[in-house]
Image: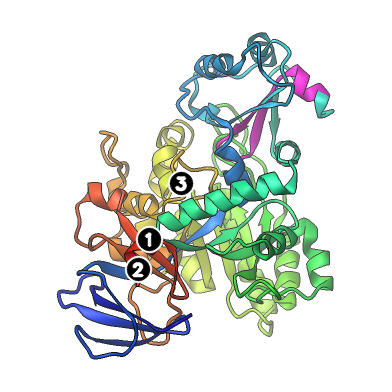
């Protein structure tokens, strides 16, 4: 990239302007405003520049596909969901499956039924995917088309739901890649420079293809699932390794494994029983998980363990602790991550810091799920999305969206940071569990891989904001205007502002 000077910029919390010098995609100087230079300059007129933002947990293909499907998030009951579905059935409807997304039956007083969906859909194959991807509600026509068995509820859960969701996304590569490119551009509009993609597939090859065909708006850490561990080992893939011929945009991500379910399906593994009965499911035992952690670390793959329920998180931390006493000399120095870490037992907060396990959390889900939490985890709701307690215990947080478990709006780290720092959104509801708010500076660190300020030597992955994120009002912060986004000094959003 050619040299560039961004003049008259502010860093968060500062009161003095400076000039930011970029050469070959790297910040080479931060000087007093007006410093003489021969390089091309752009006057940013006092805008605030922050390190580029990361979404640490995305299912990118599912997120891209969700934009072309109809939304059920407004349904507060099975009956309302069926009325939304009814409106999609027209005489001109094509024979392709009708697909809806983002329903939340955990807060419904009535329950999904196969009969109800059959009556509304009139034989048109229909599949409705829950917001967390752990459940699919389908009619008889869809069950027959995809050769799956459903009971009178019409629901598939956990692995059966994952398998069907992947089957529903089997479109021509060119169609999917166009949708992914659109989703990537929308992410860049919100200041995002990179994502950790946990799409449930062998994820390296699709991203190699997309980048080879011109995708260039985001950095991608491509996760590996446990089912593909052997293949990754054969190909000597290690977390953090750059993938060849991808212009530095594609890196091997963590090794993802699921050990319990989700709140919406009441399959997250919990100490106490759910109101509907049962404790959820534990799909990997502590002994099995310990062995997997050791194998992953010796191979150089950073473990990322999906654990939502409080009992599941204890199992995960137990396994990390056991593995730490055995696997000290490994290519991975960090312990790993727990994805979600939603519900914790009191004694487990401090273990994240002691074991070096990152809590990879999705703060906006605290507001999306508050009603489901109070219905299902009421006795321990003070230990759910307990971000302040984690930080006070010394844990490291990493923020993500878990898209498509996200609002209909594009991937938006400011919504996540706002949820974490206010425990509220601009919908008129009172803050939820406000004792667990964290500061905006802490939220920013969790969204930028710890880089809250720009420093000489940093890669110039930047977001240019129309306000100081530490000082604007809550309403502005939630929807912070992003004037431009740069990836190694190259504009991925706001090119007109940066035009020389």
Callout 2: helix, strand or loop?
Answer: helix
Q: Which residue is mark 2?
A: 498
* In the image, residue 263 above or below residue 229: above
Callout 1: helix, strand or loop?
Answer: loop
Q: Point out the image quarter for the C terminus.
A: bottom left
- Figure quadrant of residue 429: top left
Task: Report whether 465 appears left or right of 322.
Answer: left
Find the magenta span and give its range.
Answer: 128-144
Q: Residue at x 57, y 14 (%)?
A: 86
* In the image, residue 453 above or below residue 28: above
Disc 1 packing (10 Å; few <14; some 14–19; many ≥20): some
Q: Which mark is residue 449?
A: none
Q: CA distance from mark 2 to mark 1?
A: 7 Å
Q: Which residue is mark 3?
A: 410
Question: In the displayed image of the protein, which residue is found farthest to the front?
Answer: 500
User: Can I make out residue 306 in this image?
Assistant: yes
- Figure quadrant of residue 292: bottom right
Q: Which residue is mark 1?
A: 494
Disc 3 packing (10 Å; few <14; some 14–19; many ≥20): many
Q: CA distance from mark 1 to mark 3?
A: 17 Å
Mark 2 in CB contact with mark 1 (< 8 angstroms): yes
* In the image, residue 191 above or below residue 479: below
Disc 2 packing (10 Å; few <14; some 14–19; many ≥20): some
């Amino acid at each position: 990239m050619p040299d560039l000077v961004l003049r008259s910029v502010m860093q968060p919390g500062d009161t003095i302007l400076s000039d930011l010098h970029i050469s070959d995609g790297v910040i080479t100087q931060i000087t007093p405003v007006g410093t003489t230079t021969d390089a091309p300059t752009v006057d940013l007129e006092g805008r605030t520049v922050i390190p580029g933002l990361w979404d640490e947990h995305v299912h990118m293909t599912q997120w891209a596909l969700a934009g072309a499907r109809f939304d059920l998030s407004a349904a507060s009951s099975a009956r309302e969901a069926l009325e939304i579905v009814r409106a999609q059935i027209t005489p001109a409807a094509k024979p392709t499956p009708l697909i809806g997304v983002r329903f939340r039956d955990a807060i419904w007083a009535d329950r999904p039924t196969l009969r109800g969906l059959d009556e509304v859909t009139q034989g048109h194959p229909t599949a409705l995917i829950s917001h967390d991807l752990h459940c699919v509600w389908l009619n008889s026509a869809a069950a027959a088309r995809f050769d799956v068995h459903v009971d009178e509820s019409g629901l598939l859960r956990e692995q059966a739901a994952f398998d069907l969701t992947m089957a529903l996304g089997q479109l021509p590569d060119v169609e999917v890649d166009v949708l992914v490119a659109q989703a990537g551009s929308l992410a860049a509009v919100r200041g995002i420079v990179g994502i950790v993609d946990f799409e449930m597939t062998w994820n390296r090859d699709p991203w190699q293809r997309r980048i080879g065909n011109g995708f260039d708006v985001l950095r991608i850490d491509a996760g590996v699932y446990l089912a593909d561990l052997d293949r990754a080992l054969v190909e000597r893939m290690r977390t953090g390794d750059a993938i060849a011929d991808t212009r530095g945009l594609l890196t091997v991500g963590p090794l993802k494994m699921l050990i319990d379910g989700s709140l919406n399906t009441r399959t997250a593994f919990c100490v106490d029983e759910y109101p509907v009965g049962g404790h959820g499911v534990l799909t990997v035992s502590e002994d099995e998980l310990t062995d997997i952690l050791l194998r992953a670390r010796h191979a150089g793959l950073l473990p990322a363990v999906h654990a939502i329920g409080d009992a599941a998180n204890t199992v995960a931390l137990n396994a990390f602790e056991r593995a730490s006493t055995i696997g000290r000399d490994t290519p991975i120095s960090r312990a790993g991550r727990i994805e979600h870490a939603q519900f914790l037992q009191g004694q487990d907060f401090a273990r994240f810091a002691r074991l070096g396990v990152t809590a990879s959390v999705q703060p906006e889900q605290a507001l999306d799920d508050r009603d489901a939490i109070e219905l299902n985890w009421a006795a321990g709701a003070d230990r759910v999305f307990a971000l302040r307690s984690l930080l006070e215990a010394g844990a490291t947080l990493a923020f993500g969206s878990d898209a498509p478990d996200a609002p209909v709006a594009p991937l938006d780290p400011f919504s996540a940071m706002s949820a974490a720092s206010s425990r509220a959104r601009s919908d008129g509801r009172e803050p939820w569990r406000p004792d667990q708010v964290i500061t905006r500076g802490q939220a920013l660190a969790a969204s930028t891989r710890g880089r809250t300020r720009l420093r000489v030597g940093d890669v110039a992955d930047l977001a240019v904001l129309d306000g100081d994120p530490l000082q604007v009002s809550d309403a502005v912060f939630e929807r912070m205007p992003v004037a431009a986004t740069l990836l190694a000094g190259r504009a991925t959003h706001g090119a007109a502002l940066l035009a020389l």
